[in-house]
Image: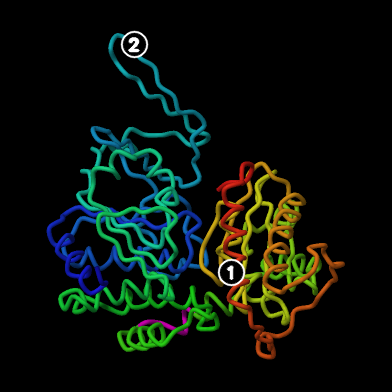
Amino acid sequence: MSTKEIHPQIWDKINASQRVLVAAHIKIDGDGLGAMLAFYALLKKMGKEVIAYYEEEIPESYSFLAYTDEVSSEITEKNSIVITLNSNTPNNRIKKLYYNTKKNQLRVIITPEKEKLEITHIQFGQDQPEPDLIVVLDIGELERVGEIYKNNRALFEKTFLINIDHHPQTTDFGNLKIVDTKASSTCEIMYALIKSNPVALELMDAEIATLLMTGILADTGNFQFSNTSPSSLEAAGELLKLGAKQQEIVNTLFRTKKISTLKIWGKALERLRQDEKYRIIWTTLSQADFEEVGIEDEGGKIIDELITTVPDADFYFILKETETNLVKGSLRAKNGADANLVAQQFGGGGHVAAAAMIFKETSLEEAEKIVLEKIRAAQKIRLNLKTAEPSQPTAVTPSPATTTSTPITTTPKENVIEVEKVLTNELKKQKKISV
C-alpha cells in the first residue's frame, strides 16, 4: 500500500478517536521530540484529548521549543487514584513516604525533609481514561518507548496503534504505519501527512512549523548530512514560509556550546585514533571523563561535528562509558560503508550512514576491541585486503568541516553482497552484547 493511500486511513482513525497517546523514543533527539510535540499540538487544535509521553527529562538544549512543559512522564493505570503534593516551597523534598494498613484502612504517611506540610498542599485525582489511539514516532521497535510500554503491554496490544518512522524497522508493529527510510526525518514524513489533510494544514502555525523544522535540521545536521534530499529542502522551505524559526533552531542546536561541552570535546580529541589501512577513525570517553567535566552525554555532537570531518575514512565511531560496564556507541559511515549492518551485530541499528549500539556488562576497553574487530572484518572484504591484522593506530586531528574533502571509492558489487552475508551471519552469533 502506498503512502498516499495510508494518509487518509490515518486521518480517518484520528477523526474517529478522542483520546490519543503520542510517544517518541527514550534518549530523545530533535527529530523524535519535534515530531511528538508537533503532533501533540496539532491534535489538541483538532479538539482531541492528547497526552505527549516521555519518561525522561527533556534535554535542556530543546527547552526553547513550545509545549515541552506539557509533556507527561507517566500515565496512570486504570482505577488509580493520583495524590499530588503542591508545596509552597519548591525545594522542600520528601524525607519519607510509606503506608500501612490498620482495621481495613490504608494510611499513607508523608514526612517532609524541612518545611511543614499542610493539608491544603495535597490534591486527589482520578486516573486518566485509557487512550483509544496510540501514535509512536521515530521508533524502530516498541521497547524504545520505554517504561510505559514495559508496564502497559496489554494497553499497547489492545489499542489501535499508528507507527510513523524513517528508521529501518527491527520489528513489525502498528495497525497502520508509514515507514519511509528514504525520508530525512520523521518530521519530514509528518509534514507530508499534514499536507495531505487540508483541515490539518489550515491548523499549522509558526510553533508547529518550528517543531517540524527542528526535526529536519537535527537529523540532516543543518543540511550537511548525506540524507539531505530535494524533498527535505522543499519541506524546510515551506515550513519557513509558515513561520518556522530556523535561525533560532540553528543558533541553539549548532552554534551554542557550553564550556563543559567544549571540555568533553577536548578529551575526545585527545584520544582520537586512526587506522589508515582499514580507514577507521574513533575515540572513547570514560565515565570518569563525564564526571570530571560535569556533563552527561555529548557523543552525537562530537562524532557529527568533529570526528567525521577527518578525511580518508569509511567508518567513524565514538564509545561512551555512561555507567560501569555500560557503553554506548555512535557509528557513522561514508563511501558506501554501512553503519547499520555493523551496529546490528551488537543489537543496535539505525541507517546506512548513521547508527547506534549499546553494550551491557562490557568494559570500555572490551567494547572498543569488539567494534574494531567487526569493522576491520567488514573492511577486509570491502577493500580487498589480504589480512585482517590491524595496522598501528595513529593520533589524528580533525580538519575544519568547510575544508574537508573525502575521496570516493568504488566497492565491487560482489564484495558488498559478501559483506552483508558476513555481517548477517554474525548477528546470529551474538550472546553477550545486547541493547
Residue found at x 38% / y 44%? 148
Q: Which disc number belongs to residue 338?
A: 1
248 in the magenta segment: yes
Which disc, if any, is residue 102? Answer: 2
Q: Nearer the viewer, mark 1 or mark 2?
A: 1
* The residue stretch that appears in magenta: 244-249
Tell me which amino acid carries mark 2.
Answer: Lys
Q: Residue at x 19, y 79 (%)?
A: 202
Kindly indicate the quadrant of the structure image that contains residue 71.
bottom left
Circle 1 sits in a helix, a strand or a loop, which is it? loop
Is residue 72 located in the magenta-colored stretch of the structure? no
Residue at the (79%, 69%) spot, across then down: 386
Q: Main secondary structure of the magenta part?
A: helix
Residue closer to the observer: 381 or 342 = 381
Label 2 Cα crowd, 10 Å radius (few <14 / some 14-19 / many 20+): few
Instruction: Name the residue rendered at 58%, 80% in the picture.
Output: 255
